[in-house]
Image (cartoon, rainbow, N blue to C red):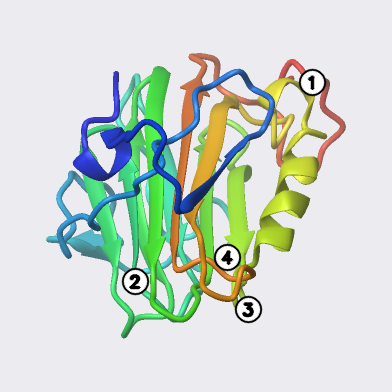
Amino acid sequence: MKFHWTWLLAAIAGCGGARSTDTGTGANHLGADLGSVPARMTRGVLSGPLCQDTECSCRDEGAPDDGGAGTPADGRKRFELRIGPAANEMWVSLGDNLYYKSAERATACFYVDLTPGETPVAIRASHNGGLSAAVSISEYGVNSKSWYQTFQFTCGAPGVCSYDELDSNKATYQKFARGLHDACGSVRVQKLNWNSSEAADQVHPNELGVTLALNIYKFLPSKPHGSECATGGE
C-alpha cells in the first residue's frame, strides 16, 4: 500500500528547504516539501474497552496482562499507538487511518487491531519555533500476555528536536538486527525514513515527517518481553 496523503507524496525536484535521512533500509527519501499538515481529527477504527468514539484512555502500564486494552478477534493483533508526550500537535497514520494528538493533550493513546502483512506508518509533527516528537507502537501478545516494544521514535521529548538528535537516532536504529526492535515480538520495522524542514537557526526544524512499515507476522509470540529471544522472534 502506498502513502496517499499529499504531505507524504509531495516531491519537488531540485527544491531546497528540507533535510532528508535514509536509515539504511533502502527506502526512498520523502519529498523535499512536507506540505500542509493533515486534518485535525482522528479517522479510523479503534478497538477494545479503553476506546469510545474517537478517543481512548491509556492502559495501566503497571497492570498485568493487557492492562485493560482487551484482546483482538482471531486473525488480528492488538497494538497500542501512544503519541507523546509532546507539547505540540502530532499526527500518525496506520494504513488508511489517521490518529491525532492536539497541543492541549500531552499524550494520546489509541488501540487498533491490525492483520498480518505490511502496514505503512506515517508520523508528522509541526510547530513554529521548534517541535518535540514522541511515538511508540506496542504489540500485545495474547499467548505471552506481554506487551512488546515494536517501535519507538523520540526527538526533543523532553526539549526541542534538533538535527543532531535526528542524526543520533539514525545510528541507534541501525543497531536493530533485521528491523526487530523487540526480538520477542512478531513485527519487523522496515523502510524507515524521515524528512525535516530547514530551520532559521540551522539547528531545530519546525516540521518533521517520518515513514516506516510494520511487517507483521502471523505467528503468536510465546515469550514475554525481556526474555532471551533469538533475532527470529522466538
Q: Quadrant of residue 14?
A: top left
For the residues marked 1 and 4, what is the alpha-carbon distance in whole angstroms?
Answer: 25 Å
Lower position in the chain sequence, tag 3 or tag 1: 3
Q: Is residue 212 visible?
A: yes
Name the residue type under label 3: Pro
The residue positioned farthest toward the right in the image shown: 228
Lower position in the chain sequence, tag 1 or tag 2: 2
Residue topped by disc 4: 61
Residue topped by disc 3: 158
Residue topped by disc 1: 231
For the residues marked 4 and 2, what is the alpha-carbon distance in whole angstroms?
Answer: 24 Å
Q: Residues within 10 Å of mark 2 (few under 14, many from 20)?
A: many
In the rendering, which numbered label is found on residue 89? Answer: 2
Which residue is drawn at the image coordinates 51% and 34% (left, top)?
142
Name the residue type under label 2: Glu
Across and down, in percent, residue 167 comes to 73, 51
Which residue is drawn at the image coordinates 56% and 33% (left, top)?
192
Q: Residues within 10 Å of mark 1 (few under 14, many from 20)?
A: some
Name the residue type under label 4: Glu
Judge left or right: residue 41 versus residue 196: left
Q: Quadrant of residue 91?
A: bottom left
The residue positioned farthest toward the bottom in the image shown: 104
Q: Is residue 77 visible?
A: no
In the rendering, which numbered label is found on residue 221? Answer: none
For the residues marked 2 and 3, what is the alpha-carbon distance in whole angstroms?
Answer: 15 Å
Lower position in the chain sequence, tag 2 or tag 3: 2
For the residues marked 4 and 3, what is the alpha-carbon distance in whole angstroms?
Answer: 20 Å
Q: Residues within 10 Å of mark 4 (few under 14, many from 20)?
A: few
The residue mark sitting in front, 4 or 2, is: 2
**Which structural element holds mark 4?**
loop
Q: Is 176 rendered above or below residue 117?
A: below
